Image (cartoon, rainbow, N blue to C red):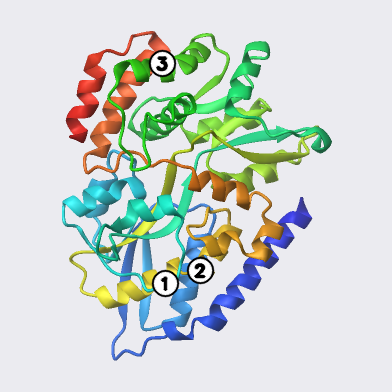
């Protein structure tokens, strides 16, 4: 285990040196010092802070000052706009609301990054060559598995995992319950992934939902059966899912790839656990964060240059070494990264096959309604009715 993380630290060091040697063009000569305020969520990996530190070293007259804003899907917009910022690091699902409220402005990234198609679709301003936000990191739902014997480790499908739960219950954990707005979003994402596993037409590549009631009942039927029979562990939120997986030494878990590093480090120390590995879900939900320029900034040009630095290919490679899913092809095909991160190709294929959530300014309202109806169906046996369709259709029209 120590060898793995020393290699990873070495890789981060090499990438850092490479960024410093190729970033002379970012030095800015100014008569006065300015500060770019970056409103962002929490990053426990340290990768984002390293990039900001590097920018600040290279640009003593144009400093980035991150402000971490704790928020949920339901209140991120309100909390972010209360924060005076030049750059917003937005969850991808919030970009449409910031656009609709004219809180951000589009710009043309000058990076030469070959973005993966699903990532490009959710951030670009169609028909202009501009982006509403530049992808900073990606994310996608993955199937984690505990490996007890590397010689006999076959990658299972989600269908295999659910079928095995009939024979041996309680070996799969997911964010399949919610206790309020702090856990609603994880629940919505997991429910959508299970629905897509049964019917990949229920949510298309542009984030457009089906409004067929029978289609939803059929797609969520197997999950409802597994939950009501207590064959799977239904955790509320990502932290509770991780806790259940680790405390009860579960075999499988649905989570984001950025958590792999910390989970591997803890679980490999356990007797009988040789590794924690990633596999694909049939269709994962696309996540990630993107950097947007505040419409009321006084420093648009400087914000663009900072975003260019933070999202360019060297930055993507560095973030990958910290566990983030990259946004562009070049990071995924980097030989040094592939040697250090054997899961990289699986993450790429999962991102390429992912679906976005409904990209709509009223997404937070949709998520609250969707969570309410589907939780009552999955956990309380209350049948989905046409009211479910009406409620979600009303906010997405």
Q: Residues within 10 Å of mark 2 (few under 14, many from 20)?
A: many
Q: Position of residue 298 (x, y in %)?
A: 20, 74
Front-lying residue, 21 or 156: 156
What separation in Å lies between label 2 and label 3 (alpha carbons)?
42 Å
Q: Tell me: 132 left or right of 282.
A: left
Label at residue 125: none
What separation in Å lies between label 2 and label 1 (alpha carbons)?
8 Å
Q: Is residue 97 above or below residue 222?
A: below
Q: Position of residue 206 (x, y in %)?
A: 33, 43
Q: Tell me: 311 left or right of 142.
A: left
- Point 34% across, 63% down: residue: 38
Image quadrant where residue 150 sits = top right
Front-lying residue, 246 or 198: 198
Q: Position of residue 106 (x, y in %)?
A: 24, 64
- Point 44% across, 14% down: residue: 221
Q: Residue beneath label 1, please?
A: 111
Label at residue 218: 3
Front-lying residue, 363 or 64: 363
Q: Residue beneath label 2, please?
A: 313
């Amino acid at each position: 285990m120590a060898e793995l993380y020393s290699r990873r630290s070495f890789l981060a060091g090499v990438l850092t040196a490479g960024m410093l040697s190729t970033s002379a063009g970012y030095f800015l000569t100014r008569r006065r010092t300015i500060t770019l305020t970056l409103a962002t969520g929490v990053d426990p990996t340290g990768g984002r802070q390293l990039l900001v530190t590097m920018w600040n070293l290279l640009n003593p007259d144009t400093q980035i000052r991150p402000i971490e804003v704790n928020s949920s899907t339901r209140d991120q917009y309100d909390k972010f706009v209360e924060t005076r910022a030049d750059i917003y690091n937005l969850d991808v699902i919030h970009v449409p609301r910031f656009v609709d409220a004219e809180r951000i402005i589009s710009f043309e990234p000058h990076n030469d990054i070959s973005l993966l198609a699903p990532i490009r679709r959710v951030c670009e301003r169609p028909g202009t060559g501009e982006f509403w936000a530049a992808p900073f990191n990606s994310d996608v739902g993955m199937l984690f598995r505990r490996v007890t014997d590397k010689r006999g480790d076959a990658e299972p499908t989600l269908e295999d995992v659910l079928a095995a739960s009939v024979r041996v219950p309680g070996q799969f954990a997911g964010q399949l319950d919610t206790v309020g707005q702090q856990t609603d979003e994880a629940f919505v994402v997991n429910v959508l992934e299970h629905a897509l596993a049964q019917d990949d037409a229920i949510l298309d590549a542009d984030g457009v939902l089906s409004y067929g009631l029978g289609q939803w009942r059929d797609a969520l039927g197997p999950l409802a059966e597994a939950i009501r029979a207590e064959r799977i562990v239904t955790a509320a939120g990502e932290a509770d899912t991780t806790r259940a997986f680790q405390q009860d030494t579960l075999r499988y878990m649905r989570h984001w790839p950025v958590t792999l590093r910390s989970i591997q480090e803890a679980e490999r120390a356990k007797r009988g656990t040789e590794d924690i590995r990633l596999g694909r879900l049939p269709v994962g939900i696309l996540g990630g964060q993107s950097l947007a320029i505040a419409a009321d900034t006084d420093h648009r040009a400087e914000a663009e240059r900072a975003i260019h630095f933070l999202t360019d290919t060297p930055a993507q490679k560095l973030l990958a070494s910290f566990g983030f899913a990259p946004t562009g092809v070049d990071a995924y095909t980097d030989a040094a990264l592939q040697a250090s991160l054997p899961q990289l190709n699986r993450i790429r294929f999962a991102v390429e096959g992912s679906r976005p959530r409904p990209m709509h300014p009223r997404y937070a309202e949709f998520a609250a309604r969707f969570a309410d109806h589907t939780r009552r169906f999955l956990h309380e046996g209350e049948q989905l009715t046409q009211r479910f369709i009406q409620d979600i259709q009303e906010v997405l029209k």
